Image (spheres, helix red, strand yellow):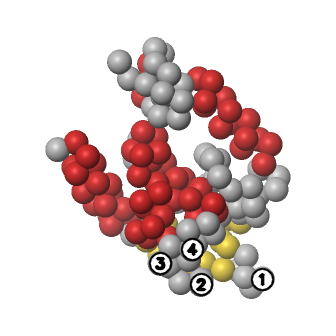
Amino acid sequence: MKTCLLCNKPLTEPESIARGIGPDCWEKIQADVLRYRHSFADRYCGMLTENVLLKRGNDDAPLTNVTHKVFLHATQGYEWGNTSEGAADLALNILWHFATPAVALRWYQVFKRDFLATLPYEGGEIEGKVIRQWIKDKTRTLFG
């Protein structure tokens, strides 16, 4: 039986099984997004279709094309060039876009270390094909 990636309770609903997160934990995540969304410093520069864009505005504020859909750590918004809570949430939301929630939750801290912690302060671009290959390599390591 599959269990929730956050609390380890059994998953019984098809939507929860597909998401990898039970209804109680999912409700908490969504409530946190609603509670903190007004304090997020996130600013966006387009929509994420293929490559992840990370740059600084004229005021040095982070700009990205990664929507903050899932909140687990950061109450102040995204960041990179370090291993902060902002970098953790950015990694989680990048993987949430490219993979299943279960894969995103399993690997986002490693993705943060491998990609975001080493980015320069000014930002950069991470190609979607590189992200997909990284996910493929990590899940192959885990499952096969």
Figure quadrant of the C terminus = top left
Q: Nearer the viewer, mark 4 or mark 2?
A: 4
Confirm or deny contact between disc 1 and disc 3 (CB under 8 A): no
- Secondary structure under the numbered disc 3 in the rendered image: loop
Q: Residues within 10 Å of mark 3 (few under 14, many from 20)?
A: some
Q: Residues within 10 Å of mark 2 (few under 14, many from 20)?
A: some
Tell which residue pokes out farthest to the top in this image: 12
Mark 1 or mark 4: which comes first in sequence?
Answer: 1
Tell which residue pokes out farthest to the right in this image: 38
Mark 4 or mark 2: which comes first in sequence?
Answer: 4
Name the residue located 50 percent from the left edge and 73 percent from the top edge: 117
Q: Is residue 111 left or right of residue 6?
A: left
Query: Which kind of residue does numbered mark 1 sit on?
Result: Asp
Q: Is residue 120 left or right of residue 139?
A: right
Mark 3 or mark 4: which comes first in sequence?
Answer: 4
- Secondary structure under the numbered disc 2 in the rendered image: loop
Q: Is residue 48 above or below residue 80?
A: above
Q: Is residue 54 visible?
A: no
Cα–Cα span, label 1 and label 3: 22 Å
- The disc label shown at residue 97, or none: none
Confirm or deny contact between disc 4 and disc 2 (CB under 8 A): no
Name the residue located 26 percent from the left edge and 46 percent from the top edge: 142
Question: Label 1 belongs to which residue?
Answer: 59
Question: Label 4 belongs to which residue?
Answer: 82
Q: Is residue 54 above or below residue 88?
A: below
- Secondary structure under the numbered disc 4 in the rendered image: loop
- The disc label shown at residue 118, or none: 3
Question: Label 2 belongs to which residue?
Answer: 122
What is the count of numbered marks? 4
Cα–Cα span, label 1 and label 2: 12 Å
Query: Which kind of residue does numbered mark 4 sit on?
Result: Asn
